[in-house]
Amino acid sequence: MDALAHREINCSGLRRLIGAAFVARLVGVSLLLGALSASAQAVHPTESQVKAAYLYNFGKFVTWQMDRGAGSTLDICVLGKDPFGPVLDSTVSGESIDGHPIAVKRLVAIQDGSHCSILFIGSSEEGRLTSILPFTQSYGILTVSDMPHFAERGGVIGFVSIEDKIRFEVNRSAAEQSHLTLSSELLKVASSVIEQSSNGRRP
Amino acid sequence: MIKSPARSLSTKLTLMSVLVSGVALLLACTGFFIYDQVTFRQSLVHTLSAQAQIIGSNSVSAVLFNDAQSATNTLAALKNSPNIDLAGILTADRVPFAKYSRDGEQAFVNLRTLSDTQIEGYWFGRIHVILLRKIIWQGKLVGYVYIRADLIEIDQRLRRYGLISLAVLLVSLTFALLFSSAFSRTIARPIVGLAQTARRVTLNRDYSVTVAPTRQGDELDGLIDSFNEMLKEIQLRENELQKAHRELEQRVAERTRDLVAANRELEAFSYSVSHDLRGPLDVVNGFTYMLLKNYAGQLDANAKESLQSIRAAAKRMSELIDDLLNLSRLSTSTMHREEIDLSAMAQAIMEELRRDAPGRQVEFVAPPNIQANADTRLMRILMDNLLRNAWKYTSHHDHARIEFGSEVKNGRTVYFVKDDGSGFDQRAADRLFQPFQRLHSAAEFSGNGIGLATVRRIIQRHGGEVWAEGVVEQGATFYFTVTPLPSTR
């Protein structure tokens, strides 16, 4: 078994050497497929790599009410300070969800984000949350952020760090208000699921 | 000795049916067992596959969001399947991600690879079966489910199956033994009865017995019926035969009695005649002798010659009477048969003949040690007659050859006396052995025609046959046989 495992590694190593164009994709795939485990052989992914992969994976467990036209893209938008850099683009490049190719958009203002399906709100926007969330709710956008207590403050999914691992909290009420259906699978792996509607309770 | 075939037939039948049913059962058990093993393995794999599928689809999010705890919780549901001792989820890079272990910490062993087209694979080991299934979600490989189940249940099944088979086999064989011994008895008993009766019939020649029919209407019944009918038929024939036999014996006894009486009368008659004839003959003989002796001077030559003729005739008549007396005695004297050497006897007679006529040139041929079981005195008379005959009928030849010998014809010994003398016409052969019948005139060869009659009488008393072959002027051969054993009737 060890021999087999080693062969797998060698394969991975070989592929990495083939071309720089593949490198990013390879990292993405290994993130996607859970190579995040603390195994010595895997490349230790960075926090932003993990978050980028999660961001994409969330899309697979969410059903939107909005009707995207056939062939149109599924947009992952970033508002405020972008923590990902090129990582997010490389992670989702060539991927699709339910037949919709994924596109990464960076917003200057929330008003430009009506076409977004998933919106990552940078921590720089913490102060403007009360104006952002009503917008996203009205457009049925899945909001994700790594700012503290994001889910409790009315966001749908908030990244948290537990025991040096990146987990996430889910606010079901917020999802409902955004007319999003979250898969039970997603709820199952959430570190906590918040039922309260706290829109605007916390500034 | 009578019982052993009975037991063997019944035993054979019993053994046969027990063997047949045993083999059939064994084959059936083996077939069922193999079928059971195959289906059990199939259903085991099926179950494991279904479990792997459920675990796989329930672990997709856990793998994607790196939630090993969630995956472990999912795996923990396998506690309800006690035969699964090790299970786990591996990432797409085959890195262990979550694990369930029934009996403490264990590593994933025998982790094999699946080809690109293969979704699932399983491997049977000696004590484990390992199933590996890909987790495919939205067309992508997410990870693997690994399940290992122990085969203790197969072992247990095997043991249970073996025990049940053994029990079934034993019970079935016992029943087969009981039934078949009962059945075989119903088949064997009539045959055995038949065999015993047949043996009794052959041993005791008792055809009055019958075999009890089985009344089962089968071939055996038919056989017994036929056998009984055959016995009845034989009995009937036997009775007729015995009746005919008795009648025959009675008739023979009557005839014999008549014959014996007639013979005795005849012998008494011939004896008295011979004896009574001798008296007057002695008178004739005595007085002619006196005449020749006392009155020789007074008689002329003519008268002397007449007297001589009378004397010669009287002498011949006396000899004739002697022979007749001898012949009649032959019939009445008691016989004592023993092994005798005919060759030596023939040689002795020939020497006697040569002494009486020393001038004759006769070659005598006889191989030594020709044996016969016969009465010595009678055989001496017989050989004397035959050799004397040969001697007599070769007297016209300057050089004669007489042969005595024996040969085996049709399984019996035939003795013969052969000469190259005057012989006889074969057409007259039957008359040779009649008393007083002569083929040659007395002038040619002396004799009274009693000799060969005597020969025939002696041979008759020995239960044999006598016959002659001859060609005129080329010789004659006289053959005779005696029954080989005195005890034979």
Image: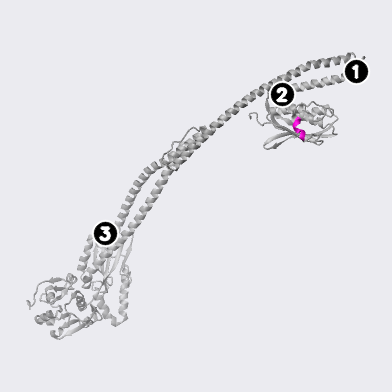
Residue A79 rendering spot, x and y as whole percentages? 15, 83
Q: Answer yes or no: do the residues labelled 2 and 1 have beta carbons within 8 Å?
A: no
Residue B115 rendering spot, x and y as whole percentages? 33, 71
Furthest residue in direction top, as rendered: B294
Crowding around mark 3 (Cα neighbors within 10 Å: few <14, some 14 to 19, many 20+) is some
Q: Answer yes or no: do the residues labelled 2 and 3 have beta carbons within 8 Å?
A: no
Helix, strand, or loop for circle 1? helix
Q: Is residue B78 above or below residue B476?
A: below
Helix, strand, or loop for circle 2? helix
Question: Which chain does the numbered disc 3 sit on?
Answer: B
Report, in whole angstroms, how far the alpha carbon at label 2 lies from the one at label 1: 41 Å
Q: Earlier in the sequence, mark 2 or mark 1?
A: 1
Question: Which chain does the numbered disc 2 sit on?
Answer: B
Crowding around mark 2 (Cα neighbors within 10 Å: few <14, some 14 to 19, many 20+) is some
Q: Quadrant of residue A78?
A: bottom left
For the question of whether residue B127 can be seen, the reply is: no
Question: What colouring does the structure picture have?
Answer: one colour
Please identify, in this view, whether the residue under mark 2 or under mark 1 is nearer the observer. Answer: 1
For badge 3, the amino acid type reads Asn
| Residue hosting label 3 | B83
Report, in whole angstroms, how far the alpha carbon at label 2 lies from the one at label 3: 119 Å
Q: Which residues are magenta?
A: B427-432
| Residue hosting label 2 | B330
Q: Quadrant of the C terminus of chain B?
A: top right
Residue B422 rendering spot, x and y as whole percentages? 82, 34
Q: Earlier in the sequence, mark 1 or mark 3?
A: 3
Q: Earlier in the sequence, mark 2 or mark 3?
A: 3
| Residue hosting label 1 | B303
